[in-house]
Amino acid sequence: MESREIVEVVDLNILGQVCPACLLVALDALNNHEESLRCGTKRLVVRTDHRDSTRTIPKAARKMGYEVEVKKVDSCYEISIGRKYESTR
C-alpha cells in the first residue's frame, strides 16, 4: 500500500458537549470527510472533555474501519482518527 502524507487536520472541538451529541457530531464529520480520511490526505482530531466519548467515538470509528488513537492532553482528550485499514475478513 502506498503511503501518502497527511496534508490537513480536521479539528473537531466538541468541548462541553455530552453523548450522544458527541458521537453524532463525530460520525457526521467522519461521513463528510470519508474519502480524504480513507486515502490519508486528512486526519480527524476530536477534542472532548466528556470521558464517555473516549469509548463511544473510537468504538464507532473502528467499526467503520478507521485507525484510532486516544490521548489525554491537558484538561481534555484528543481522539485522532485516520486512514481506514484493510479488513482481513
Image (cartoon, rainbow, N blue to C red):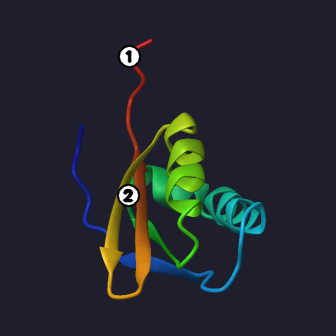
How crowded pointer 2 is (Cα within 10 Å; few <14, some 14-19, many 20+) is rated as: some
Furthest residue toward top: 89
Quadrant in the rendering for residue 80: bottom left
Seen in the picture, residue 63 relative to 26 is either above or below; the reply is above
Instruction: Name the residue: 60% across, 63% down.
Output: 33
Give me the C-alpha separation between circle 1 and circle 2. Answer: 19 Å
Instruction: Name the residue: 48% across, 58% down.
Output: 37
Q: Which residue is mark 2?
A: 40
Locate residue 63, reporting x and y percent: 56, 35
40 to the left or right of 24: left
The residue type indicated by label 1 comes to Thr
Seen in the picture, residue 72 relative to 31 is either above or below; the reply is below
Res. 44 mark: none
Seen in the picture, residue 78 relative to 54 is either above or below; the reply is below
The residue type indicated by label 2 comes to Gly
Q: Nearer the viewer, residue 55 or 29?
A: 55
Q: Which residue is mark 1?
A: 88
Locate residue 64, reporting x and y percent: 57, 39
